[in-house]
Image (cartoon, coloured by chain):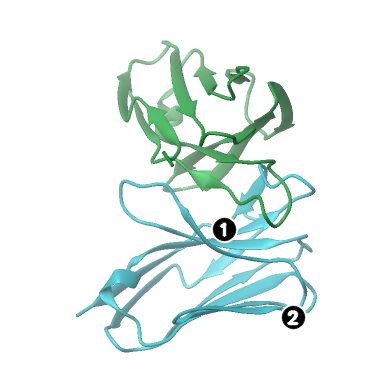
Amino acid sequence: KAGVTQTPRYLIKTRGQQVTLSCSPISGHRSVSWYQQTPGQGLQFLFEYFSETQRNKGNFPGRFSGRQFSNSRSEMNVSTLELGDSALYLCASSPQGQGENSPLHFGNGTRLTVT
Amino acid sequence: TQLLEQSPQFLSIQEGENLTVYCNSSSVFSSLQWYRQEPGEGPVLLVTVVTGGEVKKLKRLTFQFGDARKDSSLHITAAQPGDTGLYLCAGGLGDSWGKLQFGAGTQVVVTP
């Protein structure tokens, strides 16, 4: 069974630009979550999607947005990039997103560098 | 502000030694998970604990959830170089596990 796939693996952007990251969950998983990982803040929750609806949202500004498609694939978008947005962005999928038998499976992340 | 405090931040030990990593909070969590992350990869789930006082064993790893469901520990017996990695604890903030509160992590290095 293929794992969670994130593309691209690496991305370099300039301040003010926007970026779209993609996540393909494990087949059959309906919940997709996004996290930002930085050395200073660790892993911070961005948002979770379930059946194309945003179910939970973290404390990030509106420049961060996401969506989920009918095949459960998800994208996140960051507009007007700032230097502080440089981070590893991780996507995680699970069958239902809740319950002991529905663990999270993480992808290997997209490393975003903003210059 | 980290709801989950992990200690120590960094641990370097020799192969064969034992180690314990702690995860503490003032909040009560519905569940708590432990992950290990290696460089260039995403976190991999090791265990989930849901009941206060619960103890789970995974080969040489022993996980304990505090009675009040506010803290947890991970004990590794006879550590091996393959145990090297960033150990993260994460607390469930509600019914949805898609939204987890992570600790800052403990970097463990096991040298041969």
| Residue B65 in the figure: left or right of residue B38 | right
Q: Is residue A30 above or below residue B102?
A: above
Dot 2 or dot 1: first in sequence order is 2
Please provide percent x and percent y for residue A84.
45, 30
Q: Secondary structure at mark 1?
A: loop
Q: Are marks 2 and 1 in contact (CB under 8 Å)?
A: no
Residue at screen point 74% across, 44% down:
B96
Q: Residue at x 52, y 17 (%)?
A: A77
**What tint does the image give chain B?**
cyan
Along the viewing direction, whichever of A19 and A23 lies nearer the viewer:
A23
How many numbered marks are there?
2
Where residue B95 sits: x, y (%)? 79, 48
The picture quadrant where one finds residue A67 is: top right
Q: Which mark lies nearer to you, 2 or 1? A: 2
Camera-side residue: A78 or B76? B76
Chain drawn green in the picture = A
Where does residue B32 sit, x and y in percent of width and height?
A: 66, 63
| Residue A79 position (above or below residue B38) | above
Image coords of residue A98 (percent x, y)? 72, 47
**A10 relative to B45 in the view: left or right:** left
The residue where tag 2 is placed is B53
Pointer 1 indicates a residue of which chain? B
Residue B14 appearing in the image:
yes
Are discs 2 and 1 located on one and the same chain? yes
